[in-house]
Image (tube, coloured by chain):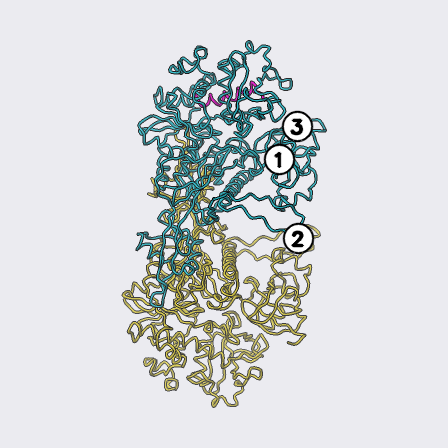
Chain colours: A cyan, B yellow
Amino acid sequence: MDDDKAMVIFQPSGRRGEVPKGINVLEASRLLGVDIEALCGEKKVCGKCKVRIEEGWFEKYGIESKKTNVSAWKEEEDKFVNTREKENGYRLACVADIKGDLLVFVPEESRAGKQIVSKAARDIQIDHDPTVRLYYAEVDPPHFEEPTADFERVCRVLERDYGLRDLNVDIFALRQLPTALRDGNWSVTVSVWNNKEVIRFRPGKAERVYGLAIDVGTTTVAAYFCDLTTMEVIDTVSMMNPQCKYGEDVMARITYHMTSSDGLKRMSDDIIEGLNNLIDQAIANTHPPKKKKKKAKGDKRPDEYVEAPEKGKTYLRLAREDVEDLTIGGNTAMHHIFLQLNPEFVGLAPFPPVIHHSLDIKARDLGLRINPSAYIFVLPNEAGFVGADNVGVLIAEEPYKKEEVQLIIDIGTNGELVLGNRHKLISSSCATGPALEGAQLSYGMRAAPGAIERIAIDPETKEVDYKVIGRDAWRKYSEPKEMKAKGICGSGILDLLSELYTSGVITKSGVFNKQELEGHPRFRVNPDTKQPEFVLAWAEESSIDKDIVVTQKDIRQIQLAKGALYAGCKLMMRRMNMEKVDKIKIAGAFGTHVDRTKALIMGLFPDCEIEMIESVGNAAGDGCRAALLNKRKRTEANWVSRNVEYIELTVESDFQKQFMEAMQIPHMKDAFPHLEGIVPEKILKQ
Amino acid sequence: MDDDKAMVIFQPSGRRGEVPKGINVLEASRLLGVDIEALCGEKKVCGKCKVRIEEGWFEKYGIESKKTNVSAWKEEEDKFVNTREKENGYRLACVADIKGDLLVFVPEESRAGKQIVSKAARDIQIDHDPTVRLYYAEVDPPHFEEPTADFERVCRVLERDYGLRDLNVDIFALRQLPTALRDGNWSVTVSVWNNKEVIRFRPGKAERVYGLAIDVGTTTVAAYFCDLTTMEVIDTVSMMNPQCKYGEDVMARITYHMTSSDGLKRMSDDIIEGLNNLIDQAIANTHPPKKKKKKAKGDKRPDEYVEAPEKGKTYLRLAREDVEDLTIGGNTAMHHIFLQLNPEFVGLAPFPPVIHHSLDIKARDLGLRINPSAYIFVLPNEAGFVGADNVGVLIAEEPYKKEEVQLIIDIGTNGELVLGNRHKLISSSCATGPALEGAQLSYGMRAAPGAIERIAIDPETKEVDYKVIGRDAWRKYSEPKEMKAKGICGSGILDLLSELYTSGVITKSGVFNKQELEGHPRFRVNPDTKQPEFVLAWAEESSIDKDIVVTQKDIRQIQLAKGALYAGCKLMMRRMNMEKVDKIKIAGAFGTHVDRTKALIMGLFPDCEIEMIESVGNAAGDGCRAALLNKRKRTEANWVSRNVEYIELTVESDFQKQFMEAMQIPHMKDAFPHLEGIVPEKILKQ
């Protein structure tokens, strides 16, 4: 490598490249298309651009990252980076100059243009029957004739007034009782878990109780903060899974556990810490922003940056103790790593999990900082590669209650499939990899401002038109410099493969159509990699001063992903002796943006009437929320997790053949006869 | 105070006095009659005389103790006192010279002549039905057709072979499962708690499971280490309650909580730490002593002191994880402090506890270092002053199953009384204070070597004969210097009051009989305190170079204690309309040594046929053991705790009158008509 250059990698985006030594980390982030928040414009007064310099040898990238590879600590950082953060390697990106190779972690709060996580709560029908309920009790004070203990005194009223019997009590909650009773002048509000155990005593009458439903994805974590009495979703918060730094997919994380002595604990600690930060954030959002502190005369420190409280907004001002229930789901590997259960065998044929059944675990036993007496409900797993997240999808969508045959596709970093109806349900998984979400592609990126989300290619001229997130006008109605394109995200990728094919840029086997492209300015061979590539956006239209291209290898990645998915669907239908399904539901952020026609054209899933393809959003998260608000959903989850038959498709004798075939872009007429009239004649004939 | 002298207080014995500055702590301990182990005779090579210098202002004694009030750290201490101990104030008593006032804590292991705690396990009938049981399971390995999870695979076998259904699993235990199953070649031993929850997985076949039954007294803590499969008591270990430093009785501890901000937490932490040490000790006893390390050539450190392994002894070599169950009982205040429940209201009329019912608490939630997945069973409380310890006594003695009327007296630092039979049981408590156990008397001491345990006083000459623990021959058959008397312990105190009275040294109201004692060499007025006192042992017979005396105030203390007990018994009998009871059972260490005739003479409890007075030893501990080995005893404990009627005696209108009368030594003929012929005529007539 050039001695004047350093390799810099930003996590969790994975963006990397060589930058000139001497520039600061913020400048490097711009060069590499990473968004770091910098409100003050490098005046070093906002403290928003905090990043963490990771230390260690990073095999995957062949670099050694050291804190000493940035310039020395500067006084102005003291204002924004506290001692604990400093010890952990935090710096201000606008202050730290690059002296050598670096792996830089950009924490969620420092990311500009936050990812548009399509994990908002949907409006699904949930009956109100939460596991944690409040009961108000007024008791007689003790006297010499009746010196019964505080707890039994309260239990007597709970039995008389509410029919609650044989209640246990958590020791941490019991410690609150004597004071709560006397502070409340012999009245208390009792939080009871599952009609079984008292988990909180509050003096007098309390009306509200809160819970969190959390969906732990391999890449993204989303949490719904709910009022358990009104069922209202009071906030949705999300973050990147902090384990991303150990590997992008499930197998990489399992491998990390197997190859490093404390890998499991480290990954588990990271997700727990991440969840605690997410909880803190949800709690903090219920408080008005802090007022500016009055400075003493002569204090030269800058004014603190303070957001104004929203007008007319009422703040609940909750504390951690107010979160008294939590449900959580994730794929089996995320489930195991979160619980510090050995995930090794989930990654080894025949992929048995450690446990299927749901678990009720005290928050304190996992180090989750909600009410310490609260239980966490961990959704059950179906199989090694169809986890608690899929159970969440099932209890949200309830295909086991319907007569119509549904195919439910949950595309995250792994693809999970369920097929069937109330008579029979089977599930399977397919290794789509993260390509459909934009990862692993040369210019793949998260769904953030600047990401190409729609593409159209003219079949005649092969000219590219596109639209980026954050700008309404398409390229052809804009000045080049207005586009500020940065990369391509999941929904753009679907458009991409379909448009490349229908415009004739690639053949049905996914290879660049050299004949048609001969001499076209957008088609070229990259001099460094010797790979053919096609330009989607020119450097002048980008915010990264580089052409944004799709390479032959990128196309191969997309084909592998869509092939895995299509073959999986087809093999499952064969198992059930089906030619066609009644409905296709697409769960996950991916589904929200999918163009159904283009998905059919590129052969993402089997034929289905277009209007019967439905996006169901973050159904896994909805399932967690259903389990939070209705305890019968927990029973249902356990039932369904053991009554969906898991099919291991990779052991089917013709799996490879099916998979290879599925990588091709299908013959339209054969695959989708009913698309006639919807898709141009020219395409149908291809 | 003399500038050349320092006030030194030793804990937990409470022995205190002024000593010349400049002597070392070991020398001071000898002057004050405290036994510290010193095997090497101050050659500074055994390291046995480790003590802890406490820091702080001790209101009770009016001294400020500081680590700097002893001489500086010496190199030879490094060999025996590790860094952590050093930080906590540990020193070698033979090295540290006294420079100022000190409060010195002598840890259990440094005490010579360990207390003879009469808390050995009795042979009581317990049916074998432990709460924790082992089940062996052989399962089929998973394959593609049957990739069921590890846990469900094991559960299937447990249901098929043992009928166990719907088992929960502790998360800490679940983490062991994948490895245990594979290490055991698909066979595991499963520890199941209460037919409900799996708390441990071990590979292959394991046969043994262990538990501890712990009786937490205000002064002494005793633990029975039991094999749950054979019911054998494999060891009994005991210690002083480390909370003694905060006050000797229950009220003093409650006061400490109310007057210091973190008093409850501190006392709770101390008993937990003490229990952990006790557990460590029980575990260490199952291992052979460590072999001497080979020293490298030139290593000048002394050989480690090593006990030889006992010949023919087999060692179980257990680990903490092997302790999978624990039952614990104590009076209500000890119960509350142990669990960090506010004990304030237990000390305030009408004395309601926080809870009656038993509690199942995870060991890890209390910081007890046994198997972290294990549950602690905390016995239920009857009332504020009749606690879980008394429930232990009841389930061990089972008066509720008998027709005969029993009066059960548990004399610890507080007296707890139960009266009745299978038709009705009532309980009460009486504030005996610790005088009957030897505390609070000028020369009171624990039942340790050198303690006077038997006394006889000649009615004619008023000469005193006595026997000390650790020496078989009485005083009159020994040379004075052979006696090495140090003080008087619980059993000696009973003898004392009875002998003082029958010999005419005191009158029936407890006052020295000045007429009879006029000019007697053993009777004198202490020039310092102006208190009359009677010499029991001359300085030359003692190991403390001082006359051992009983003062008028001491006698008053004993009378207060016995009066409280006697009045309590009488008032309870009146409540039940009883003149006489069928049986008196005396529980506690005290009962083991009690001379039944002398107890009747001094009026300790109501009239009863002498042969119907029975010592039942540490019945509270036996009850804990019964609950450990038989889970139905736990149900029985909860039943009895709510079906014994608690009577608050102090609110009886004539309580004071009864109490004052009971302080007197009773008229023999009236109180005990049947004692004629047993007690000398002269006494009966008094």
Give me the C-alpha separation between circle 2 and circle 1: 39 Å
Residue A201 makes an appearance in the image: yes
Disc 2 designates what residue?
A297
Q: Position of residue A235 (x, y in %)?
A: 46, 40
Amino acid at circle 3: Glu
Q: Which mark is in front, 2 or 1?
A: 2
A525 vs B297, left or right, is left
Q: Which residues are magenta?
A: A548-566
Name the dominant secondary structure of the magenta segment.
helix
Mark positioned earlier in the residue sequence (2 or 1):
1
- Tell me residue A209's x, y (percent): 41, 47
Disc 1: host chain = A
Is residue B138 visible in the rendered image? The answer is: no
Q: Nearer the viewer, residue B269 or B466?
A: B269
Question: Left or right: B299 with respect to A240?
Answer: right
Q: Quadrant of residue A145?
A: bottom left
B525 lies above or below A217: below
Chain on which label 2 sits:
A
Q: Which numbered dot is residue A104?
A: 1
**Which residue is at the front of the view, A610 or B173?**
A610
Q: Which residue is mark 3?
A: A18
Look at the numbered discs 2 and 3 and tell me whether their residues touch, using CB distance below 8 Å: no
Q: Residues within 10 Å of mark 2 (few under 14, many from 20)?
A: few
Q: Is residue B156 above or below residue A499?
A: below
Q: Do marks 1 and 3 both belong to one polypeptide chain?
A: yes
Q: Amino acid at mark 1?
A: Val
Residue type, label 2: Lys
